[in-house]
Structure formats: structure tokens, C-alpha cells
Image (cartoon, rainbow, N blue to C red):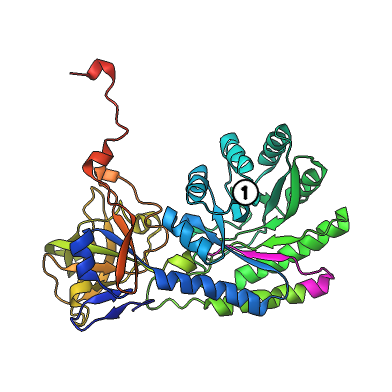
Amino acid sequence: MLLGTQRVNEFGHLEIGGCDTTKLVEEFGTPLYVLDEEYIRENCRRYVDALRNYYKGESRVVYAGKAFLTLGMCRLVEQEGLWLDVSSGGELYTALKADFPPERILMHGNNKSPEELKLAIENEVGRIVVDNLHELELLNTIAQERGVRANILLRVTPGIDPHTHRFIATGQVDTKFGLNLKNGSAMEGIRKALSMNGVNLLGLHCHIGSQLLRISPILKAAEIMVEFLKEVKDQTGVELRELDLGGGLGIRYLSTHNPPSIEEFVQRLCAVMEKNLKRSGLSYPVLLLEPGRSIVGEAGTTLYKVGAIKEVTFSKNGKLFKRIYAMVDGGLSDNPRPQLYNAKYEAIVANKASQKGEVHYTIAGKHCETDVLIWDVLLPPLEPGDILAVLSTGAYNYSMASNYNRFPRPAAVLVRNGKAELLVKRETYEDLLRFDVIPSHLQK
């Protein structure tokens, strides 16, 4: 499975963005996150073009920064004309330091602190997505103290089962996110917001979950949200002008995954919107989508160096089995997803990319846990020093990387037209000690 600009070059090596991955390893070391700039830009444009082609009203593509966010990524997203969704003070600070236009920022979070809300208000972010009634009251107070009205969307929980892993499902009734539609708290939030002097309610938001390989749940969510817009108008006389349906479109982690294309997803979503808007008699609201994984996920590859290789035999249910472990120089600290929710990946031996797979390997990380990246993958015979490329690691890998076992976090590079440039420098051992303090009574 080759993705984006990946190809096998004349040397039999994996190439991304015109860069030989073996050369990238020589220059930048391993583990290494490699981001395919051309593929990221292509996905941004596909969303923009699809909404322009299939939606009759105004639309905005809002990149979900939680998937992968750096100063450089902010600049890239800005160049493509997208808005930016941030979900913490740290993500907002990153965007502001990158000089991302604050009027094109949406501020998310289910428990925003007063400091985060103040930072958003002081920098006049485009929208604050209010998640609960407590936050609504808090934001109203802070805004009034500053003599401003904050533009808000109200997050609503539509009660949809997104048919994804339970750890990344967010739109069902039993969730920490949003105001529940079915128990009346969403309408209560609407009425409160409309009565407040410190907020300006512009519309609604929902997000039902992530890595959706079927889009029927989000189509149902769109139908429910339009019905609620009609209910709001009927009960309050106010026709809200914006509807944000979140993100969640899945990607190909495995060759067997077959998510809808960006174009199919947008076309079907817009058809449902049009049908239900006509039925309700509402005008077209500004439609916002918040893709993250489907923009950057397949555009990311992580390169590792193979070290020890170990063969074990074991008995299970009276049968004898053999497993070959290939150890790589990363794992849980640079990609926690397999441990968090049993995420599956495919891999290519970057320096043997033209060779056929002959041996089944289990790719193990080097952490003090049952740290396995891939339980079973067919590869050419491996040797210490080979370079393993794990595919579709652009989303939620760097974002969730840690210093577990005091591992320095990897570097990240952006590749395009045969050129590689750093997005994130590799951490050093010295970096790990930057914030350590020895209490006075332990000083030598």
C-alpha cells in the first residue's frame, strides 16, 4: 500500500515527496516522523473544492489541529485558506505564535479553564465552541468583564452511535461532550445563550466520533441537527446561521480499509443537508467541517531502525506456534495508539521496498511494557540496521508522543519535491532535564 507521493525508486528504496527514506534516516536519524506536504495540501484542497461543488451555501473547512499541530503546520493550513480548530490553551498559543489569523480559529474543549477562555477572548478568536452550561456562564461573565461579546457555537450531543472504537466515539448519549439533545439540556443552553449579554450565539456544533469508515452515522447526525435548527427557530424565533458537523472521516491504516473518498463523503453529506433544509423550510446555514485525520493521517510515515531479531516457539491449545520479533528503536512513546485502542498498521521495509514479503514478523518497540506496534506483518527477511516504515502515522502519533522511559521525542520533517525540512527538532537527553528540579534538602 503506497500512499500520497510514496513510490519505490530505482534503488528499490521507499521514496516520499521525492526524498529517499534511507537518506532521510542518514540525515535526521530514527525514529523519524515524515510528513508528505504535497499530499496534505491535496487533501486540504479536495475538501475545499468538494464543499464548493456540492453545497449551495457558504462553507468552511476547519483543520482539526489535535491530529497534528506545529508552527509549520499552522502556516501550511493558513496558506490553504482553511480555518483552524484548537482544543487547548497550548494549541491556541501555538496557532497565535505562528501568526495564524485569530478570526479563523475555533476554540474547543470540554473543560476550558478561565485562563484558556481569557486567552481566546483577548485574542478575538473567531468562535468559541461552548461545551456545557457551566462554561456558558463562565464565558459570559469573563466576556462582560471585558466589555465584549464572544462569538460562540453550542456543542450538541445528537445521540448517535458512530460505530467506531468506543475510546474515540463522542456523539452518543453517554459522553462527556456537549449538551444532550434528548434530555432538553441543548435547548436550555440555547435559551440561556440567547438571553446573555456576553455571548453571541451563531450556531450549533456536533462531532460524533473519529476514524469513521461508514458515513451513515454522520449523515443521520446531519439530519438530526437540521431538525434541531428548525426546533430552535420554532421555539425561539431565531434562525441560527452556522452549523458545524465536526470531522471523523476515516483513513486507510490497512489495505483492507475502504473509507469513502473525501468527495463521496462531502457529496452525500451535502445531499442530506439539502433534502432536510428544504423539508424544514430553513435557509442554508454556513456549513463547517473539521477534518483532521483525513487530511494528515495518510500523509505521515514513521521510520524506525531494526535492531534485535528474536524467534520464539510456544504452545497454545496443544499446538506449537512460532513468532519472530523484530525490535525497532521506538514504540509506545512515539505511537501509543496500538496500546490505547489496539490500532492496526501496515509497514514497508524502506531499504528493501522492491522485495516481496516472505516472513511474518511481530514489530516490537523497546519500552518496558508489552510494547508491540504490529503483531503480524509479512515482510522481506529482516536484518539489524534495516529501516522500517510504518504507514499512516500522520495523525495522533506526534500529537500523543511522550517521554515515557525518558525517551527523547523524535524529529518530524516535511518533504516535498526532493527536499526535506524540519518541522520539529529531535529532543536530546539534556532536553529531558529542562524542568527537573532537585529539592534543596537533596542537593549535594
Would you say residue 49 sits in the magenta stretch?
Answer: no
Q: Is residue 124 visible?
A: yes
Check disc 1 and give the amino acid type. Answer: Val
**Direction from residue 376 to residue 395 in the image, left or right:** right
Q: Quadrant of the C terminus?
A: top left
Q: Is residue 318 visible?
A: no
**Residue 373: which quarter of the image?**
bottom left
Q: Residue at x 44, y 59 (%)?
A: 73
At which x and y percent is residue 157? 66, 55
At which x and y percent is residue 185? 74, 47
**Residue 119: which quarter of the image?**
top right
Give the residue pinned by disc 1: 125
Would you say residue 290 sits in the magenta stretch?
Answer: yes
187 shown above or below 312 = above
At which x and y percent is residue 56? 72, 76
Residue extending farthest top: 441
At which x and y percent is residue 59? 66, 68
**Direction from residue 36 to residue 290 in the image, left or right:** right
Q: Residue at x 50, y 45 (%)?
A: 93
Magenta-highlighted residues: 277-291
11 shown above or below 171 = below
Q: Nearer the viewer, residue 33 or 149?
A: 149
Q: Quadrant of the N terminus?
A: bottom left
**Residue 163: which quarter of the image?**
bottom right
**Direction from residue 160 to residue 359 in the image, left or right:** left
User: What secondary structure is marked by label 1?
Assistant: loop
**Direction from residue 157 to residue 164 in the image, left or right:** left
